[in-house]
Image: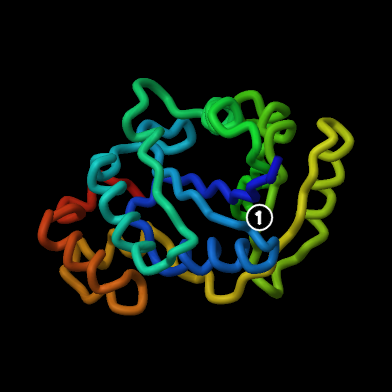
Protein backbone atom coordinates (compact mmCIF):
# COMPACT_ATOMS: atom_id res chain seq x y z
CA UNK A 1 0.00 0.00 0.00
CA UNK A 2 1.32 3.41 -0.96
CA UNK A 3 2.05 5.53 2.07
CA UNK A 4 0.93 9.12 1.80
CA UNK A 5 3.25 11.61 3.48
CA UNK A 6 1.11 14.37 4.89
CA UNK A 7 2.07 17.40 6.91
CA UNK A 8 -0.55 18.51 9.42
CA UNK A 9 -0.44 22.20 10.18
CA UNK A 10 -2.93 23.31 12.80
CA UNK A 11 -3.47 26.67 14.44
CA UNK A 12 -5.93 29.42 15.21
CA UNK A 13 -4.77 31.35 12.10
CA UNK A 14 -6.27 34.58 13.43
CA UNK A 15 -5.38 35.72 10.84
CA UNK A 16 -3.17 33.44 8.74
CA UNK A 17 -0.18 35.35 7.37
CA UNK A 18 2.80 35.00 5.07
CA UNK A 19 5.08 33.52 7.74
CA UNK A 20 2.57 30.69 8.22
CA UNK A 21 2.77 29.96 4.50
CA UNK A 22 6.56 30.10 4.56
CA UNK A 23 6.68 27.60 7.43
CA UNK A 24 4.42 25.17 5.57
CA UNK A 25 6.45 25.47 2.38
CA UNK A 26 9.73 24.96 4.19
CA UNK A 27 8.43 21.87 5.99
CA UNK A 28 7.06 20.41 2.78
CA UNK A 29 10.28 20.94 0.85
CA UNK A 30 12.62 19.82 3.61
CA UNK A 31 10.70 16.65 4.42
CA UNK A 32 9.44 15.91 0.88
CA UNK A 33 5.82 15.88 2.06
CA UNK A 34 3.24 14.92 -0.52
CA UNK A 35 0.73 17.38 0.92
CA UNK A 36 0.32 19.85 3.78
CA UNK A 37 -3.14 19.94 5.32
CA UNK A 38 -3.97 23.18 7.13
CA UNK A 39 -6.47 22.74 9.96
CA UNK A 40 -7.83 26.00 11.43
CA UNK A 41 -9.04 25.36 14.95
CA UNK A 42 -12.62 25.72 16.01
CA UNK A 43 -12.22 26.01 19.78
CA UNK A 44 -8.50 25.70 20.63
CA UNK A 45 -7.59 24.76 24.21
CA UNK A 46 -4.42 26.90 24.43
CA UNK A 47 -5.79 30.27 23.28
CA UNK A 48 -7.38 32.70 25.72
CA UNK A 49 -9.67 35.57 24.82
CA UNK A 50 -11.96 35.98 21.85
CA UNK A 51 -10.84 35.56 18.27
CA UNK A 52 -12.55 36.14 14.95
CA UNK A 53 -15.17 33.53 14.18
CA UNK A 54 -13.95 30.20 12.90
CA UNK A 55 -15.77 30.65 9.59
CA UNK A 56 -13.68 33.75 8.89
CA UNK A 57 -10.40 32.11 9.87
CA UNK A 58 -11.25 29.17 7.63
CA UNK A 59 -12.02 31.49 4.71
CA UNK A 60 -8.81 33.49 5.18
CA UNK A 61 -6.73 30.33 5.36
CA UNK A 62 -8.20 29.16 2.07
CA UNK A 63 -7.35 32.51 0.50
CA UNK A 64 -3.79 32.30 1.82
CA UNK A 65 -3.04 28.90 0.29
CA UNK A 66 -5.21 28.84 -2.81
CA UNK A 67 -2.26 29.18 -5.20
CA UNK A 68 -0.37 26.25 -3.62
CA UNK A 69 -1.45 23.04 -5.33
CA UNK A 70 0.15 20.90 -2.60
CA UNK A 71 -1.73 22.61 0.22
CA UNK A 72 -5.29 21.91 1.28
CA UNK A 73 -7.48 23.29 4.07
CA UNK A 74 -9.63 21.07 6.27
CA UNK A 75 -12.68 22.26 8.17
CA UNK A 76 -12.69 19.22 10.44
CA UNK A 77 -12.03 21.23 13.62
CA UNK A 78 -14.18 24.18 12.60
CA UNK A 79 -17.22 21.91 12.23
CA UNK A 80 -16.35 19.84 15.32
CA UNK A 81 -18.29 20.62 18.50
CA UNK A 82 -16.34 21.21 21.67
CA UNK A 83 -12.67 21.90 22.34
CA UNK A 84 -10.27 20.79 19.62
CA UNK A 85 -7.33 18.74 20.85
CA UNK A 86 -4.46 17.86 18.55
CA UNK A 87 -4.38 14.27 19.81
CA UNK A 88 -8.04 13.81 18.88
CA UNK A 89 -7.59 15.39 15.45
CA UNK A 90 -4.60 13.19 14.65
CA UNK A 91 -6.50 10.10 15.77
CA UNK A 92 -9.43 11.03 13.53
CA UNK A 93 -7.08 11.44 10.58
CA UNK A 94 -5.34 8.15 11.31
CA UNK A 95 -8.65 6.32 11.51
CA UNK A 96 -9.86 7.86 8.24
CA UNK A 97 -6.57 7.51 6.36
CA UNK A 98 -4.59 4.60 7.81
CA UNK A 99 -2.27 4.64 4.80
CA UNK A 100 -1.05 8.17 5.62
CA UNK A 101 2.18 8.92 7.46
CA UNK A 102 1.55 12.10 9.41
CA UNK A 103 4.00 14.85 10.32
CA UNK A 104 2.73 17.40 12.80
CA UNK A 105 4.23 20.84 12.08
CA UNK A 106 4.66 23.25 14.99
CA UNK A 107 6.86 26.12 16.06
CA UNK A 108 10.02 25.47 18.04
CA UNK A 109 8.65 27.42 21.00
CA UNK A 110 5.56 25.19 21.07
CA UNK A 111 7.82 22.15 21.28
CA UNK A 112 9.05 23.39 24.67
CA UNK A 113 5.52 22.95 26.06
CA UNK A 114 4.37 19.93 24.08
CA UNK A 115 4.37 17.68 27.15
CA UNK A 116 1.72 19.96 28.69
CA UNK A 117 -0.71 19.29 25.84
CA UNK A 118 -3.66 16.94 26.16
CA UNK A 119 -2.55 13.33 25.57
CA UNK A 120 0.78 14.52 24.25
CA UNK A 121 2.23 11.02 24.13
CA UNK A 122 -0.54 10.03 21.74
CA UNK A 123 0.46 12.97 19.52
CA UNK A 124 4.00 11.57 19.42
CA UNK A 125 2.71 8.08 18.70
CA UNK A 126 0.52 9.19 15.81
CA UNK A 127 2.84 11.62 14.05
CA UNK A 128 6.41 12.67 13.53
CA UNK A 129 7.01 16.11 15.04
CA UNK A 130 8.54 18.79 12.80
CA UNK A 131 9.65 21.76 14.89
CA UNK A 132 10.30 24.89 12.84
CA UNK A 133 12.64 27.54 14.18
CA UNK A 134 14.31 30.78 13.13
CA UNK A 135 17.91 30.47 11.98
CA UNK A 136 20.15 31.94 14.64
CA UNK A 137 17.92 30.76 17.47
CA UNK A 138 19.67 29.02 20.33
CA UNK A 139 19.18 25.33 19.70
CA UNK A 140 20.41 24.06 23.04
CA UNK A 141 17.05 24.44 24.78
CA UNK A 142 15.18 22.90 21.86
CA UNK A 143 17.54 19.94 21.67
CA UNK A 144 17.30 19.28 25.42
CA UNK A 145 13.54 19.27 25.20
CA UNK A 146 13.54 17.03 22.15
CA UNK A 147 15.80 14.54 23.89
CA UNK A 148 13.49 14.47 26.91
CA UNK A 149 10.45 13.88 24.70
CA UNK A 150 12.23 11.12 22.82
CA UNK A 151 13.08 9.37 26.08
CA UNK A 152 9.61 9.77 27.55
CA UNK A 153 7.51 8.91 24.51
CA UNK A 154 9.82 7.52 21.81
CA UNK A 155 8.97 10.66 19.88
CA UNK A 156 10.36 11.20 16.39
CA UNK A 157 11.37 14.85 16.23
CA UNK A 158 13.06 16.75 13.42
CA UNK A 159 14.08 20.40 13.30
CA UNK A 160 13.56 22.67 10.31
CA UNK A 161 15.17 26.12 10.01
CA UNK A 162 12.93 28.73 8.40
CA UNK A 163 14.00 32.35 7.73
CA UNK A 164 11.59 35.26 7.55
CA UNK A 165 9.34 34.28 10.45
CA UNK A 166 9.16 37.71 12.08
CA UNK A 167 5.44 38.16 11.49
CA UNK A 168 2.84 37.59 14.19
CA UNK A 169 -0.93 37.41 14.05
CA UNK A 170 -0.99 39.80 17.01
CA UNK A 171 0.83 42.45 15.00
CA UNK A 172 -1.44 41.94 12.00
CA UNK A 173 -4.50 42.39 14.21
CA UNK A 174 -3.10 45.56 15.75
CA UNK A 175 -2.31 47.07 12.37
CA UNK A 176 -5.75 46.12 11.09
CA UNK A 177 -7.36 47.72 14.15
CA UNK A 178 -5.50 50.93 13.31
CA UNK A 179 -6.55 50.79 9.67
CA UNK A 180 -2.96 50.42 8.48
CA UNK A 181 -1.68 48.61 5.42
CA UNK A 182 -1.08 44.90 5.84
CA UNK A 183 1.16 44.66 2.77
CA UNK A 184 4.04 42.25 3.32
CA UNK A 185 2.20 40.57 6.18
CA UNK A 186 -0.75 38.91 4.44
CA UNK A 187 -1.72 38.51 0.77
CA UNK A 188 -3.87 41.26 -0.73
CA UNK A 189 -6.88 38.93 -0.77
CA UNK A 190 -6.61 38.30 2.96
CA UNK A 191 -6.18 42.02 3.67
CA UNK A 192 -9.29 42.77 1.64
CA UNK A 193 -11.21 40.09 3.52
CA UNK A 194 -10.16 41.49 6.89
CA UNK A 195 -11.30 45.01 6.06
CA UNK A 196 -14.44 43.94 4.21
CA UNK A 197 -15.61 41.96 7.24
CA UNK A 198 -14.33 44.48 9.83
CA UNK A 199 -12.66 41.62 11.71
CA UNK A 200 -10.27 43.43 14.03
CA UNK A 201 -11.78 46.86 14.47
CA UNK A 202 -12.30 46.34 18.20
CA UNK A 203 -8.77 45.26 19.02
CA UNK A 204 -9.32 45.44 22.77
CA UNK A 205 -11.30 42.22 22.50
CA UNK A 206 -8.19 40.30 21.59
CA UNK A 207 -5.86 41.27 24.40
CA UNK A 208 -2.15 41.82 23.96
**Image quadrant for the N terminus?**
top right
Front position in the image: 129 or 195 = 129
Q: Is residue 107 left or right of residue 177?
A: right
Find residue 55 and report its horizontal and vertical position in percent: 24, 42
Which residue is at a point 46% across and 58% down the rendered structure image? 71
Residue 17 seen in the current view = yes
Find residue 199 and report its horizontal and vertical position in percent: 18, 52
Which residue is at a point 28% across and 62% down the rendered structure image? 174
Front position in the image: 8 or 4 = 4
Find residue 145 and report its horizontal and vertical position in percent: 79, 46
Q: Is residue 88 left or right of residue 21?
A: right
Which residue is at a point 62% across and 70% down the rendered structure image? 162
Q: Quadrant of residue 128?
A: top right
Residue positioned most to the right: 151
Q: Quadrant of residue 53?
A: top left
Q: Is residue 55 left or right of residue 29?
A: left
Mark 1: few/some/many CA within 10 Å (<14, 14-19, 20+): many
Find residue 157 and report its horizontal and vertical position in percent: 77, 49
Residue 110 seen in the current view = no
* Colour convention: rainbow
> 4 above or below 123?
below
Q: Quadrant of residue 35?
A: bottom right
Q: Say which residue label 1 marks.
A: 108
Front position in the image: 187 or 185 = 187
> 163 above or below 83?
below
Which SS class for mark 1?
helix
Front position in the image: 184 or 21 = 21
> 11 above or below 188?
above
Amino acid sequence: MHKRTWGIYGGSFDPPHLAHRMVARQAQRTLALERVIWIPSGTPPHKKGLMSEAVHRLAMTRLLVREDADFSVSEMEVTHEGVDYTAVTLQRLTDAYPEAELTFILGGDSLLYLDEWYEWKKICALARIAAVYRPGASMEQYERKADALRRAAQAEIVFIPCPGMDISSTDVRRRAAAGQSLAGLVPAEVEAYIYTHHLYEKQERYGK
